[in-house]
Image (spheres, rainbow, N blue to C red):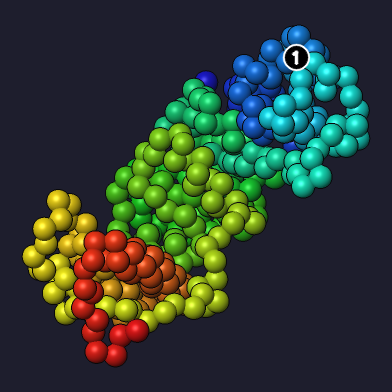
Amino acid sequence: MTLQAGTDTALAATDHGAASSNDYRTGTAARLAGLPVETLRVWERRYNISETARSARGQRLYSDAQVRRLSLIKQLVDEGHAVGSLARLEDEQLRTLLPAATPAAPAPARPVKVALIGDALVRRLAGGGRELFALDIVGACASLEAAGRLRTSGAEVLLIELAELSDAALAPIAALRAQLGAAAVVLYRFGASATLARLRADGCIVAHGPADLSQLVLLCESARPGAPQFADAASIALAPPRFDDASLAALASMPSDLICECPRHLAELLMMLNSFERYSGECANRTPADAVVHRDLGVAAGQARMLLEAALERLARAEGLALPVADGAA
């Protein structure tokens, strides 16, 4: 693909793209329906499974409704039905075949609408790859300086690659996000910690690049508005530590006739988690966003600590070990 600096580029010629917001090519439709693309092609060839439209180049184009139908047929095939008999049924007839306890297949997740910024990034993604079925690339330009003229078809995520990330990029990224109403994923090779922190505080996802294709897809899916987030840490109740550091150190140094050293390793892991849980609670917060991140880290460490405490107790019972319990520990 040839890209002129400052010129918007639609990557419609790549096989992973969608012809419109409701038209998916075979590879994308198969991924959304949970099918291997080879299986879908066999179904079409043998059973004419869907009355699809065709692009100007003769490629099959599937609508949202047709993708839902494919997902439903796949669900029924998994239940033991023959695809040849299902292909002739209407959608309502298909739904009546579902087991009573099985809900109809939910609407599949659609590809993330992404606008690309960065010449090297555009060239790399133009080569395609199976992972990119999850992305609908709606526009691209060579540089952040040229991105002000970028016109996209409802981009949800800006995927930006900058070799050197400096404070000079902060204002253009913020302006472009406001202009397009999109989230941002920023890839960088070199950058100051303060600049990275400011981008993250502004709600951008920042990652050291270049990332491989599967990582890019995950980053874009995470950035899409409405993507699942971590559970609200404020709503999670954590039990206090069952073992303090002195108790765990005693366990780690306890002589054992066991062939494995799992008790010692578990005790050492718990000491590290106890320490990190305390550290995250005391870490300095420069912004409200920092406070939220550190709170979530502390909760994650606390949840991991509780799981390993329970595992240590099970191991102790199985091996007949006496667990030292700290004064005041539950």
- Above or below residue 128? Residue 229 is below
Q: Quadrant of residue 252?
A: bottom left
Q: Relative to residue 175, is residue 66 drawn left or right?
A: right
Relative to the observer, which residue lies in front, 49 or 86? 86
- For image coordinates 41% across by 68% down, the residue present is 303
Q: Position of residue 140 (x, y in %)?
A: 56, 36
Relative to the observer, which residue lies in front, 216 or 312? 312
Q: What amino acid is found at the position of numbered circle 1 in the picture?
A: Glu
Relative to the observer, which residue lies in front, 70 or 188? 70
- Above or below residue 303? Residue 69 is above
- For image coordinates 69% across by 12% down, the residue present is 42
Q: Which quadrant is home to the C terminus?
A: bottom left
Q: Quadrant of residue 240?
A: bottom left
Q: Relative to residue 221, is residue 166 drawn left or right?
A: left
- Above or below residue 213? Residue 291 is below
Q: Quadrant of residue 270?
A: bottom left
- For image coordinates 32% across by 74% down, the residue present is 277
State the residue position of label 1. 44
Q: Position of residue 85 (x, y in %)?
A: 83, 18
SS for callout 1: helix
- Above or below residue 287? Residue 53 is above
Number of numbered discs: 1
Q: Relative to residue 297, is residue 270 drawn left or right?
A: left
Relative to the observer, which residue lies in front, 37 or 308? 308
Q: Position of residue 222 (x, y in %)?
A: 54, 51
Q: Position of residue 162 (x, y in %)?
A: 39, 44
